[in-house]
Amino acid sequence: MIFLSWLLLLLPLVAGIKIDWSSESSINDGLALLAKGLMDYYNGNDTGKTPGMFSNPYYWWEAGAAWNSMLDYWYYTGDTTYNSILKSSLQFQVGDYWDYMPSNQTTTEGNDDQGFWGITVMAAAEKNFENPNEDQPGWVYLAQAVFNTMAARWDEENCAGGLRWQIFTWNNGYDYKNTVSNGCLFNLAARLARYTQNETYVEWAHRVWDWTKSVGFIIDTEEWWPVYDGGFIKNNCTDTEPIEWTYNSGLLLSGAAVMYNYTNDAVWLTRAQGIWNRARVFFLPGDIMYEAACQPSKQCNNDQRSFKGIFSRFLGLTCLMAPTMSLEIQQYLANSSIAAAQSCSGGTDGHTCGLDWSHDGWDGYYGLGEQMSALEVMQNRLVWTRPPPLTEDTGATSVSNGSAGTVQAERRVITHLTLGNKDKAGAGVITALVLIFLLIASWWLIF
């Protein structure tokens, strides 16, 4: 019944990128154009560039999210064109301790950044993407290493729990606890619980959800449940920033759906349904998806312009994990994909995608986020054409290791750099000496 309903949603024809949704070859051809457009932003294999990274101004976290889009592209179309780049990129960025804390991100990486790479390799395990060589960490191992290092940062001393936005004290946002960081931990816990059947992950899913709700980042009204951005530690995380982003809702929505699928506990379905009821705010008339917090003011930054793609991916996962919600969600995806396709008519290639899908044709915006969002909203109409996420008991081949990320005795889970008064004084003296030396050197060169 669900499959027949899905077929009915695939019948309309779209303009811009022309896809006949009743034809597998037409769908694959259209998605191939979008995938090619996304990969046009990849320069990690160029001389002097970093494998796995996309061109400026796209940050490391968005690269992780974009590789998830390319993983899904392979899975739904069978096109292996980019698989070698995908695989080598996911492996290059694992870091010395195989936990997605690479040295090239030491000064800037946040909990949410690491979380999105973990979610991508979790999807690789669930989809049986080609496993790394035996001397390399497997996909689910990497997901578990990310989970373990994130869980070890759970901060009971401030706000009675939760993850900070940032890992390192010197980064702006270290004093802020946000939904996206905790949502990544929750999403990973739910999917690892289902994949491994280890009850520890179930306990963590409950812990993260309960804390997120207790501080008011999730509001459970009778009908719809908004998901807010976060709060500051200095106010005990109670001064909630009431901004709603698509990807925050998607992280918690799909995680709750996964928990329902694994536990068969109706409370998780109620939670998923409540978030989805509110998530309709992210659709314009005609069921056209948009980023409500920034699109109307035309203030979406490069990060925010990718959020619709991540949201679409999580909507597809929700359909699979909570099938009673699928028909309605797929209708929204179908209408949004038609709008997105007609926006993918710009640029020199003729299929560059825009930001505002309600605009008649291409709106002049372009970038990795726009391309990723259009690709995801379209390919997540295909979730019922492939097997659902696999587990260790249903054919997944990636081998789990519950101690991943914790086996190095001398490895700090994370060491926060804090400077005492003596350290600050010493640093001041060193800085003064360096400055004097530079002034003397400059005088000597001039005179």
Image: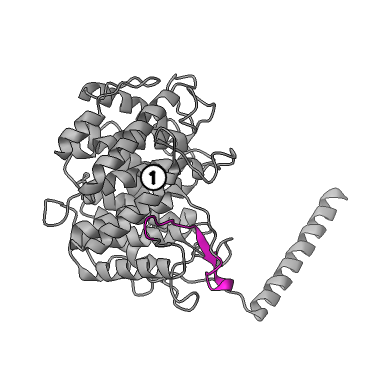
Per the rendered image, the range of residues in magenta is: 222-239
Nearer to me, 369 or 315: 315
Q: Would you call the spot at circle 1 few (<14 residues within 10 Å), some (14-19), or many (20 or more)?
A: many
Residue visible at 36% across and 66% down in the picture = 209
Furthest toward the front, the residue is 222
Residue 338 percent across, percent down from the top left: 36, 27
Q: Compared to 443, does 234 lie above or below? A: below
Q: Report x, y in % for residue 61.
A: 44, 50
147 vs 138, left or right, is right
Left or right, residue 218 beside residue 170:
left
Question: Is 226 located above or below residue 86 in the figure?
Answer: below
Where residue 65 sits: x, y (%)? Answer: 39, 46
Label 1 amino acid? Ile
Pointer 1 residue: 310
Determine if residue 182 is in view.
Answer: yes
Instruction: Name the side, left or right, on which 59 lies relative to 207.
Output: right
Find residue 424 and report its image quarter: bottom right
Which residue is more in the foreground, 243 or 281?
281
Residue 124 position, x and y percent, is: 26, 48
Nearest the eye: 372 or 79 = 372
Residue 195, quarter of the rendered image = bottom left
Question: Is residue 235 within the magenta segment?
Answer: yes
**Considering depth in this image, is 34 or 251 the residue closer to the camera?**
251
For the question of whether residue 400 can be seen, the reply is: no
Element assignment for label 1: helix
Total labels: the figure holds 1
For image coordinates 15% across by 51% down, the residue present is: 396
| Image quarter of the N terminus | top left
Dominant secondary structure (helix, strand or loop) of the stretch shown in magenta: loop
